[in-house]
Image (cartoon, rainbow, N blue to C red):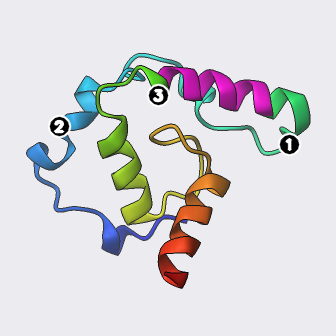
Amino acid sequence: MASISRLPMPIQETYEWQYEGACNGVDPEVFFSPDAERGPRRRARDAAAKAVCAVCPVARQCLEHALTVREPYGVWGGLTINERDSILQAQKAG
């Protein structure tokens, strides 16, 4: 679960980048897998989400947010939870 203690202050400017996201208006199910989703179906959904992120003007801010609050689910800033965990582990080790 994301730690709310790491969330930025509830100031509109802090979250304004989200309005510019390429994902704005896209079905959230593209970015968040159902509990039992595995294998090719999950990889295809992740690829579809990453394709949206690849053209997103705020992907960097999105990824920074996900890493800062340690978002536990979904594709954020073009990376899955496992990919984000790898970055966080590398930061811890380095």
Residue pointed to by mark 3: 53
Task: From the top left corner, tell me how far across and down residue 50 is, in percent.
Answer: 57, 29
- Please name whichever residue, 78 or 93, is drawn nearer the observer in this view of the structure: 93
Look at 84% across and 27% down and name the residue there. 41
Magenta span has 90?
no
Say if 65 sits above or below 21 in the image. Answer: below
Outermost front residue: 94
Looking at the rendering, the stretch of residues picked out in magenta corresponds to 43-52
Look at the picture and state if 62 lies above or below 2. Answer: above
Q: Which is more N-terminal, label 2 or label 1? A: 2
Quadrant of res 21: top left
Q: Amino acid at mark 1?
A: Ala
Q: According to the image, label 1 marks what residue? A: 36
Of mark 2 and mark 3, the one earlier in the sequence is 2
Nearer to us of marks 3 and 1 is: 3
- Residue 23 lies left or right of residue 8; in this view the side is right
> Farthest residue in the right direction?
39
Q: Nearer the viewer, mark 1 or mark 2?
A: 2
Q: Which circle marks residue 16 in the picture? A: 2
Query: Residue 55 at what x, y percent from top left?
Result: 41, 19
Instruction: Identify the mark at residue 48; answer none if there is no mark.
Output: none
Q: Secondary structure at mark 1?
A: loop
> Is 15 positioned to the left or the right of 69 in the image?
left
Q: Give the Cα distance between marks 3 and 1.
A: 24 Å
Rounded to the nearest angstrom, the CA distance separating label 2 from label 3 is 17 Å
Q: Secondary structure at mark 3?
A: helix
- Rendered residue at 78%/45% (across/down): 35
Residue 12 in picture, x, y percent from top left: 11, 44
Asked which quadrant contains residue 75, the reply is: top right
